[in-house]
Structures are given as structure tokens and as C-alpha cells.
Image: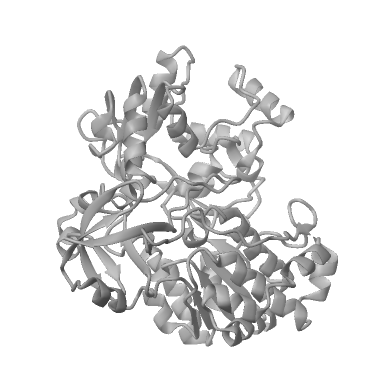
Amino acid sequence: MTNSIKEIADADFICVFGSNTTETHPIISLQVKKAVREKGATLVVIDPRQTEISAIANHYLQLKAGTDVVLLNALANVIIAEGLWDKEFVSMRTEGFDELKKAVEPFTSEYAAGITGVPANTIREVARGYAKAKNASILYTMGITQHVTGTDNVLAVANLAMLAGHIGKPSSGVNPLRGQNNVQGACDMGGLPNVYTGYQKVDDPAVQGKFEQAWKGSLPSKPGLTLGEMLDEAHHGKLKGLFILGENPILSDPDYHHVVASLKHVDFLVVQDIFLTETAQLADVVLPGASFAEKDGTFSNTERRVQRVRKAIDPIGNSKADWQIICEIATAMGYRMSYESPAAIMKEIASLTPSYGGITYERLEEGGLQWPCPTADHPGTPYLHVGKFSRGLGKFSALAYRLPAELPDAEYPFLLNTGRRLFHYHTGSMTRRASGLDAICPEEFLEVNPADATKLGVSDGDTVKLVSRRGELEIKVQVTDRVMPGTVFASFHFAEAAINKLTNTDRDPVAKTPELKVCAVKIVKA
């Protein structure tokens, strides 16, 4: 997030784009509700599926899945055509405005309405409201990133924020809500194939030299593979071993059968987790990791806040804290990795990572700190890009409309959209073991529009066979107008209805994120 969670409550205009905020980020949704209730903020919700938060929105834009760039370009078109952009901000802090202006010129509100399904008048009203607001915040999640055009979608959001000057100030910005409690921290710590800690590039010779000196060893000069690319290489026999930590790709990744086949192709599979997940059941060795309550460390949350995690109980049975397991494996493989404690690891992180340079366990005892926090006396950074961007001038991106990789056709006439539900989390490895949660939400349903249900001759509770080009499964139907005709929805929490048996592995060419939000399926009455 460029801004902080608490700032949302003071925004004048909030755009929630591709995010089921009340169910997937309920604490953050409280700030949105507070802004609407106490400040009278304008709330715009953009999503193919009617979520709970859309009920309190001033404007709900139910666009067709995969048409995000068209809508965002149309909003930019209105702002430019009506002279509503922030002239000073664009002039002083950005580049590429003329290219953007030319690119969005064809994306009139009427043109966008024909593609997205959002009325032209609504597009114009939302664009005017966003541009004229004193402070406007955009919140988004995987509803716009899990597409083959995910990078374009995010760049189009950035275009909008810069165009209206809604960045680098309180209660504004571009705010991706991270999907898991420490996914921000994992990325910060180099859990990506192309960077070390603090997003320092692997292929930068100066960065490589710094880490080689600190770690006393040679390091690769080229980026590694993403998760999807690793599975592809494993499938083709080019990747011989995999070490999976706290991840259950059999249920969470697209094309279930491809994932299983890929994992079975490796010579040696190690899974480190707290439960015997579907993925762990295929492993040659399972290492028992420790839960959050059994270890010390830090989590970095979605607003870049680094917070202490304190051990409540000793690890149960033969389990150990993840850092200890990793150190022991590295040492056994010939590289002596010895740290006294997580605090010692944080000390090394601070010495090698400019954005974490001032973060220590001693300081974190007083409360969380938001990076960048470069020095010991720095208070942390509540919002980014004050005065200038990290690259200097913010760059507008001229973006064209590109179709999803797979669209409905005569054989597969429905579009499947996937996501999460309130009572379960991710692949259910923890929440499905909570008897109270599983009692409330014990099974998955396929949400089907009433008009489609009538045509198919199905009713609430009927079992259908859901089929894509990659697989099939049986699932019960829930008839609801939350989804538009021609679109169906299901979560990926349930192994009994493993929805990623159906999704495809086509990826964004830049971020390599799979297109989990658009998939062509057919429904066969069981």
C-alpha cells in the first residue's frame, strides 16, 4: 500500500476495485465503512460479482470480467476530455502524458459501456467524482491482478492516480490489499525470483557484490523462476527437486492436474508445513514447521508495517521454527548458517536492506514500524511518494485493450470467476480444521444467476458437473443474482470441490501471475 490503513477512514472518495473487502479484509473494510458512515465519503465498488460491500456503495459498477483496462482507460478519457486532471501534479511530477492522452482517446464512455457493460453515464460520474475529490483512495486485490493483463490493469490504476494527483498525500494513493498475513514480508525479504531483500535487483552487479561479501559466497547474476515456471520445468523434467514451505499449490494453483503431474515428476520433493496438506501428502520428506504461536519473528503487513510476533508456547512435538530448519539444512548442505535468534537475523536484514535499515527488535518492542525506515531515528513512513517518485518522475503507461486468454464459446458458454469466502481461508488447511468455521460453511457452492439456472433446469442444492478444457468436478448450485448471467463463481477453499482443477495456467507476460479470474466452463446437470 502506498498509504496506511487508518488513513482510509479520512478519504473523501474510495474506489474498491476487484476486492471483496468485507469478507477477505474485514478489518480494513471497517475503515471503509467508517469513511462512508462518519465522513460521507463517496464509495465506488467495481467487481463482476456483487459482494457485501457493494450494498453500501454510491456506485456499483458490475463490469464484465477481463475488461478492466477498458473501464480504467475510459475513466482517464473523461478526466482528460473534461479538463479535470491535476495540471500542476502532471506537469511537475510525471512524464508521458501526451502518450496517455492519445492512448485513451478512443476509450469514450459509450465505447467502454459496450464492452464492460457499465453504463456510460455512470463511467462519467465516477470519473468526475474521483478527479474532483480532495483525497481519493483506490483499494484493489487479485480481482485485477490475476489476469493475463494483470500488469496492465495495475498500470492503468497508477495512471488514474497520477492523472488526478491522488498520490503522495494522506488518505489517497494506490493500495493493493495483500492476500495473506505476511505475503508483504515474504516479498520484502526477497521471496521473489528477481530480487534480494528490499527489492534489490539480482542482476545488479553492485547488489550482487554486496550480498556476496556479506554471505561469503558466489551468487547467481540472473533471476530465477516464478512458481508457475518452476512447475513447468518440473513437468518437463528439467527441475529435479523442490522445497515447498507453507504452500499448498495442489489446491491454490491453476490446473490441478498439471500441478500434481509436475510434483510427481521431480526426483525429490520436500514440504515444510504445520499440517499434512494435499501437497505434503506427495512429498518424499515432510518437515514439521511451527505455527505463529510457536515462534518469534516479525510479520510485515499490507501497509508495510513490520510487527513483532512473540512465541506463546514451545514448538509441539518434533516441529521447529522455520528459520531453525532452514539454517540446519543449509549447514548440512555445506554452508554454515548460524544465527543466535530471529533478532540476529533482523540485524543482518537491516545491515543489507536500506528500507529496513532502522528496524530493530528493540524498536519494535515499542510498536510496529512502516518501511521505508532507513535509520535508527527514522519514525517510519505512513505514505509513499511525497514530493517525488522513487524513479524520479511518475511514468504514464499507454495501454491497449487485450482479451483474456480464454473466453466462453459454444462448447463452454460460461465464465468461471474464483475467489475467497468469509469463513475459510486459502486452501482451508487451517480453517477447515476449525470445527466452528466448518460447521457454518461446510461445503462449496457454485453461484449461478437465476436466469441461467432456469435455462439449465437446476435449483438451489442441485448437484452439477462443472467442466473446463482441463478438468471437471461435481459441485452443488446456489442460485443468486450476485453473479451476472453467463458468469459463475466458486472459491478454492475446498478439496472436495477443487475449483483449480478447471482454471488455466495462462499468465501475465510480465508478472507471470496466472489468469485465475477468467476461465471458460460448461455446466452439466447431474
The answer to whether residue 56 of the structure is visible from this angle is yes
Image side of residue 96 versus residue 498, left or right: right
Q: Image height check: is 270 above or below 226?
A: above
Left or right of 144 on screen, residue 266: left
- The quadrant the N terminus occupies is bottom right
Who's the residue at 56% across and 63% down the image? 175
Q: What's the residue at 25%, 39% (across, down)? A: 278
Colour scheme of the picture = one colour
The correct choice, above or below, for 301 with respect to 361 in the image is below
Q: Nearer the viewer, residue 512 or 199?
A: 512
Residue at the limit of the structure toward the front, as seen here: 410
The answer to which quarter of the image holds residue 330 is top left
**Residue 6 locus on image (x, y percent):** 52, 69
329 versus 416 height, above or below: above
Residue 144 point in image, percent of width and height: 52, 61
- Compared to residue 446, the image places residue 332 above or below, namely above
Asked whether residue 311 is in view, the answer is: no
Residue 523 in percent (x, y) is at 27, 62
Which residue occupies the extreme top position in the image? 334
Q: Is residue 517 left or right of residue 192?
A: left
In-front residue for pair 62/252? 62
Q: Residue at x 49, y 15 (%)?
A: 335
Residue ID at (34%, 21%): 268
Residue 505 drawn at (x, y percent): 44, 45
Q: Quadrant of residue 413?
A: bottom left
The tally of labels here is 0
Q: Which quarter of the image is occupied by the C terminus?
A: bottom left
